[in-house]
Amino acid sequence: MPLKKILFACIPADGHFNPMTELAVYLKDKGYDVRWYTGKSYENKLKQMEIPYIPFVTAKEIKISELDEAYPERKKLKGISHIKFDIINLFIHRMKDYYEDVKDIFSSFPFDLLIFDNTFPGTIVKDKLNVPVVGIGVVPLALSAADIPQYGLGHQPAGNFLSKRKQNFIKLMAEKLIFKETKFAYNELLASLNLPPTDHNIFDISPLNATVFLQNGIPEMDYPRNAIPKSIKYVGALNTWNKKSINNHSKDWGTILDPKKKTILVSQGTVEKNHKKLIIPSLEAFKNSSFNIVVVTGNNDTKLLKNQYPQKNIYIEDFIPFEIIMPLTDLFITNGGYGSSMISIKHGVPMVTAGINEGKNEICARIDYCGLGIDLKTERPRSYSIKEAVDQILINDSYKKNVKRVQNLLNSYKTLEICEKHIENLLFSSND
């Protein structure tokens, strides 16, 4: 049987690349010919993974850290305006170039399957090149449904008749007014590729049009739905691939941290560089407290922070593998990155969340709704708000119990085997 060829493709962002990496290595080790198309920032990581890297040619890479320089007007936007700007400029307007590159790749590497993150134009590739495609949901399932609120606004499901009517009215207004521009921009893209227009909400396109859509996570950490299309499969936690030797280069935090104190981990992820949003308010809340405070900066002004906060209970590092520090952590303060939130749940750690931009409002709202933590519903929480939320979680056993319940369910999924089964079905079930 000829070796099956699989192309992975994603936009150049950690939150889109990382969740797909362990699956890519797993499939490569199973004997598939796996290659990856993305930005040059990930060339070295793919080399470590021993997966051939295919660079952008027509497409241009704009690093997440350079977005505000590339789009200076973006810094002035908030809320819905910020969401619309990102959807149109960071995603839709870049899709045609991604497709042109993939079309050229197909001529020299005729892949049997495309695996793509849910913001990449994978369904366009399916329609134009007539190949099956597997979407990867690297954010909470964005698919519209009658029983849940409009994705993108960070709202939680309505609980009574009046609030449901309000929820439906907001959804109608969002569809007619707020997201009308995104649908228009996407249909302009389709027309430029000689494809028919779509009536779908922009968030529904990948989940509904992918041949199979593998959703990172499980239903118990999402909003309940009355129904879900058969092509959409929750697969458990999609993990980031790391070298097995990574543990040898980490400090022994089990001996560094005071075992008599509870440990709070604080992180703003790799995108947000402004420490004043979450890290500094958290440090102000707990400096000289009875907690171990561990801060991960993502290589952003670490030395400056260390000088500013020399307290003995505070530990500030460029990077600590979460798989190492989470087992020692009692509570996680985060701006709501989906990958780090998933790791927190995997280790049974409740969260205090404070994030809105880049779709983090949707992640934070779900964590709060499912009883896995408290959402402060802001990008800039006050120190006293953080402290109150931490106290509430540590006093109230329900948060720990909820996280433990979901942790057990999440860890029961054999994620890579589940993904492989669906991929094999696509590659081999239609063979003559």
Image (cartoon, grey):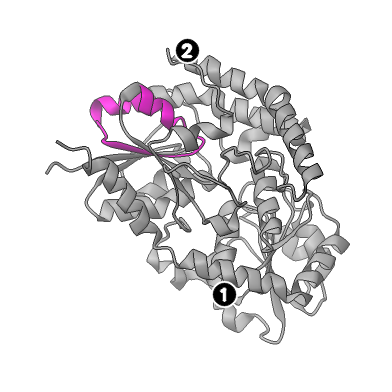
Q: Residues within 10 Å of mark 1 (few under 14, many from 20)?
A: some
Is 102 placed above or below 269 here?
above
Q: Is residue 165 left or right of residue 406?
A: right
Circle 2: element type: helix
- The magenta stretch is 101-127
Task: Specify the amino acid type for callout 2.
Answer: Ser
- x and y percent of residue 68 in the render? 68, 33
- The front one of 429 and 394 is 429
Query: Which residue is disc 2 drawn over?
Result: 192
- Residue 320 shows up from this direction: no
Q: Residue at x 82, y 54 (%)?
A: 381
* Residue at the spot of label 1: 327
Residue 392: which disc?
none
Q: Is residue 394 visible?
A: yes
Labels 1 & 2 near each other (Cβ < 8 A)? no
Q: Quadrant of the N terminus?
A: top left
**Left or right position of 304 against 114:** right
Residue sitting at 68 percent across and 29 percent down? Answer: 84
Work out whether 70 lies above or below 332: above
Seen as rendered, the residue at the extreme left is: 1
Q: Amino acid at mark 1?
A: Pro
